Amino acid sequence: MGMLNLPGFLSCGKKKNFSLSNEKDGHSSDSDENMERGNWSNKGDYLLSMVGYAVGLGNVWRFPYLTYQNGGGAFLIPYTLMLALAGLPLFFMECSLGQFASLGPISVWRILPLFQGVGITMVVISTFVTIYYNVIIAYALYYLFASFQKVLPWSDCFSWADELCSKTQIVNDCNTTLHGEIIHANYSFVTSNNLTCIDGTINYKPVQFPSEQYWNKVALQRSSGLDETGNIVWYLALCLLLSWMIVGAALFKGIKSSGKVVYFTALFPYVILLILLVRGATLEGSLDGIEYYIGRQSNITKLMEAEVWKDAATQIFYSLSVAWGGLVALSSYNKFQNNCYSDAILVCVTNCVTSIFAGFAIFSILGHMAFVSKRPVSEVVDSGRLIVTVGIGTCIDQGMTITSFLTLFPGFDLAFVAYPEALSKLPVSPLWSFLFFFMLLLLGLDSQFATIETLTTTIQDIYPKLMKKLRIPITLGLCTVLFFLGLICVTQAGIYWVNLIDHFCAGWGILISAVLEIVGIVYIYGGNRFIEDIEMMIGKKSRLFWLWWRMCWFFITPVLLMAILVWSLVTFSSPTYGQVLYPSWGTAIGWCMIIFCVIWIPIVAIIKIAKAEGNLCQRIVSCCRPAANWGPYLECHRGERYSHIVDTKKEKEHEIPTVSGFIY
């Protein structure tokens, strides 16, 4: 009724008097629907940003390895089911939530003030992760620059290597026959007396690949453990600085600039993957690997093992980047009536297709592994001494299974040890090395753009006037602070810090946030009520349309997330890096980090309840109701359901942070 005449309400037109300032900060333009916060320039910017955020390093090496370990093509069955049951429902929920309210991961919890600490937990975890994630990008930059040499520096045991460095097996001792008697002797004695070793009695010396020693001795200058910090590795520090400069340059105008950069950073990795696939397909035996991957040699009996289903659920959950806050932040810049339903499906399918596509490139190599070792593809993982092909090339495995190799070189170590060793075997190896590490760089930058945008969106929601005037200095200042915080990760003990943060912060906290997010929205705010909110954006849908989503949101997805969380808690083990154990104080720091991440959930809930009125039950009930200013950001989108909403701008004036700048 009279709401249209209230001063300060935001409308859908280009009425500049409704914005906080008549000046533009580069984050909004005249074509935007939301003149205050800004919108994506076009849908392509948003979709590629989402794809870049979701598609990361795990799609390239983690998914193919899990597929290999869990029965080949048979693994695609639980993987697809977990996408439908756990990944997509939560992904769609977060995209809808951010787009409906046009708010970031903290302010969006006006929907359920009691759970606002969940949003803070997401942002704090994203802050921890962005510190070490850019260090991994710095590693990729270092190897990228090191590839500009005629001979790759890790292709052989050069001056930096020690006596353990070798590209071939070195015999240590064996049984031999001397004067009709069988004796056990050193290999030097055997060769000096022109004797021969008896088959099956040869023992090999423990040796290290040149790429492994280069990674530890040259790239990292790795110390003996977390308690030996050592010096800052200056060239890694410079690479870290460069990576932050790239991030800052891409985000200096927020989504208006990053939305253009992702057209290259999100698409070019697919070109490189295609090149890797073509190269792999030209290797002998590659067809056997692909046949194992797509079904003919798949081990369907693996589906009877609970571990396979757990791996599928975990991979889906983490690869889609749900519960980090980034999906809410990126979607908050959509126009209100954007079809977030089709966007969610498109991005999720693209993410999974990318993993499968990468699998073809990797499995063509595994087929070549089987061909070289003269074994079936299904047995390669369990073999003892074999020639291991990783990426595109061949490296010698000294009596080590692929499984133990991946345990010794987990995650990013695999990319900086095994892959470089493989690349060094190729003709024109510097070119292949450059392409591979350039792909890693782009995959990392995409995710980093979205994570930093999550932080700046949070600042914008809390201090809109300040962000309007000082977006560039605040963005650059944030990158500078995070750079200095990351310097501990480029010391000689830096890799231990990277592993420690990843071990504690990128696990439980995200699972806890995801469980509370879906439980809070579905069971407290109301799943049917949330569906009505979504229909305000994408139009009315039939009950049959929502049947699947109701089944997932109300039961299946929460149960699966709880199962993953419980499994993670039950199987928790103290952090290690390869065979290096962490000191007790290091583990204690890890626990402090995860406690600092999740403690905001009870703290904010207690503060909210304390500020409410009435007895304890009344206060809790009050905090479980949406805030007075919950609803669509622009007045013209509120309709009858949200016609009662209070003045958004006036409310913002009273949103004075009381806990670390996050609680209003």
Image (spheres, rainbow, N blue to C red):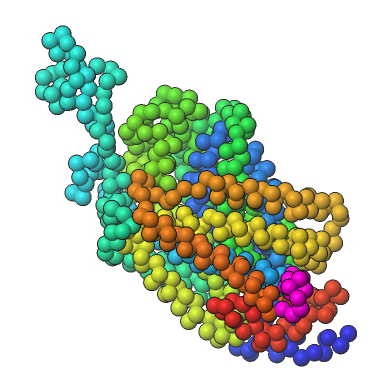
The spot of residue 193 in percent (x, y) is 11, 19
Residue 399 seen in the current view: yes
Image quarter in which the N terminus is found? bottom right
Please give the name of the residue rendered at 61% of the width and 60% of the height, measured from the top-left corner: 513
Q: Nearer the viewer, residue 148 or 473?
A: 473
Would you say 100 lies left or right of 424 here? right
The spot of residue 322 in percent (x, y) is 61, 58
- Is residue 373 positioned above or below 309 on the image? above
Would you say 593 lies left or right of 550 here? left
- Is residue 112 positioned above or below 561 on the image? below
Would you say 414 lies left or right of 450 here? left
Q: Nearer the viewer, residue 296 or 237?
A: 237
Please give the name of the residue rendered at 66% of the width and 87% of the height, measured from the top-left corner: 653
Which residue is most to the top?
180
Please give the name of the residue rendered at 44% of the width and 50% of the height, measured from the top-left corner: 574
Would you say 202 lies left or right of 323 here? left
Give, as a single range, the part of the protein colored magenta. 612-625
Q: Nearer the viewer, residue 79 or 598?
A: 598
| Residue 34 picture quarter | bottom right
The spot of residue 530 in percent (x, y) is 78, 64
The spot of residue 59 in percent (x, y) is 53, 49
Which residue is most to the right?
1
Q: Does 619 appear in magenta?
A: yes
- Is residue 108 positioned above or below 440 on the image? below
